[in-house]
Image: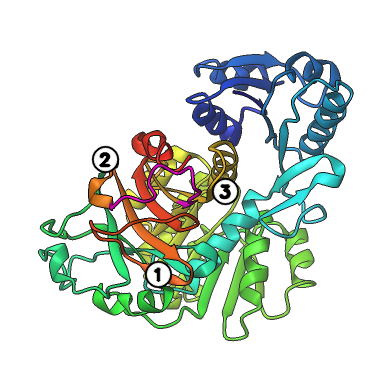
Amino acid sequence: MKAIVIGAGEVGYHIAKFLSLTHDVVVVEKDEEVARRADELDVQVLEGNGANADILASILHDADILVAVTGIDEVNIVACMTAKLIIRSHPGWKEAKTIARVSNPDYIDVPVTSRSQVGVDIMICPELALASEVAEVLSSPSAIDTEVFAGGKVQMMEFAIRPDSKLVGKQIRDLKLDDCCIVSAIFRKQEIVIPHGSDVINANDHVVVVGKPKALEELGRIFGNVEPHRNRILLIGCGIVGFYLAKLIDKDENADLKIIEYKKSRCIEVAEILENALILNGDGTDLNLLREENIEDMDVVLAVTDNDEKNLLCSLLAKQMGAKKVIARADRPDYVPLFEMIGIDMAVSPREATVNEVLKLTMGKGIEKLTMLEGEKAEIIEYTTSRYSKIIGKSLDKVKFPKNAIVTTVVHNDDIIIPRGDFVIREGDKVIVFALSSAVSAVEKFFK
């Protein structure tokens, strides 16, 4: 299979890296230095404008997918439109799927949509996807991450185990979870554990639980992280991500939202749109300003400027000054574990939404949703089985499933089931699988 990636920045580089495991990849990048970095991968690199018709015509033959993820919306859209026109002018050529990364709210107002009428099969807004993810976490105060599957019937929550938690030293089998919940993973420093009943919970572990949403609502009590609804929120940085996030928070009449934005013109622009937020023109690293705004009383501080280093500094200051929970944006993937290592409660990256959507599109039919976890070391994948899936019709204890993967939940009709060894998966079931990234290709074989 063949994939074309337009733009080799952080998003494009990681998409090309993953696609190169299963595809022949061609990367088009006009910046010489950025293109040189992409040369490190097992891909073909062309220097030039990815929206140039001549360049596209030379590489589109037999392409299965084209992903345009430069930092310029218009270039991405034009690249997809041009690719479709070129393909349609060659009747014998394969119809490649086109994906464009778009950030401007004039073009998109949802995280993922289709604009096939203009030649873009999938349009993705990583910034809006990130804002939606953070807003979802804010609605679940006890969790540090959350995601829904199977149309909202199944939920994943990640909990941090504090050193003073009563669960420290307990075995998984002693948690007494509801029958519709399962601990699917433990993130422990740099290690990922797919747990068994005898595994022991340690202080500072991150525990991933999957199950029915109603049952997960009570899990905050089990994990010792009962906290009030997070009403007092300080948002540092009101660029694209900050603005999307502020609009989502501003809809909650109970939220007390303050925004610190460095650019005065941006403050005026945002103040005209948001009804309930207090907009402050200032620097999020200004200690006097943070003290004046009583940062120690904040339930959540969100550092989402366009600069990773500034987000890190703002987050550290907020933590040191007593903020209860701090969430930081980290565009560079290697910064995410660093942020969490030094005590930031959650680090989020807008590029993950793009990577997830592209991978889902290229992994084949039957995949409904894919979520990367722990710096792309693990994945939660939602499959829909067909009559051709190798996993159906056999009890799970008879299936030679990969060692580093686990079937966490099955949705059969409207029933949510935590499968045991004698459970038989049937055609049409929605199956949620947790797997280390190294095991995903082996898992796929059971569902294709």
Position of residue 104 measured from the top left corner of the image (x, y, whole percent): 77, 51
Q: Residue at x 82, y 55 (%)?
A: 106
| Residue depicted at 31% across the width and 75% down the height | 219
Percent from the top left, x then y, of residue 72?
75, 38
Q: In this view, does 355 lie to the left or right of 215?
A: right
Dot 3, how many residues are within 10 Å of its Cα: few (below 14), some (14-19), or many (20+)? many
Distance (Cα) linking label 1 and label 2 = 23 Å
Where is mark 1, residue-wise? 416
Question: Does residue 237 appear in this view?
Answer: yes
What's the residue type where badge 2 is placed? Answer: Lys
Say which amino acid is labelled 3: Ala
Task: Classify mark 3: helix, strand or loop.
Answer: helix
Q: Does the magenta stretch include residue 385?
A: yes
282 in relation to 115, above or below: below
Q: In the image, is residue 383 above or below residue 163?
A: above
Q: Is residue 95 above or below residue 251?
A: above
Residue identifier under label 2: 400
Q: Residue 313, position in %: x, y? A: 45, 52
Mark 3 and mark 1: Cα distance apart in space: 26 Å
Tag 1 secondary structure: strand
Determine the residue positioned at 56% across, 33% down.
Answer: 15
**Relative image position of residue 120 (x, y in whole percent):** 78, 41
Name the quadrant containing residue 66: top right
Residue annotated with mark 3: 353
Q: What residue type is labelled 1?
A: Ile
- Please state which of residues 25 and 70 is positioned toward the viewer in this rendering: 25
Task: Name the one closer to the observer, 253 or 297.
Answer: 253
Q: Indicate which disc, 2 or 3, sits on the residue closer to the N terminus.
A: 3
Pointer 3 or 1: first along the chain: 3
Residue range corresponding to the magenta coloring: 382-395
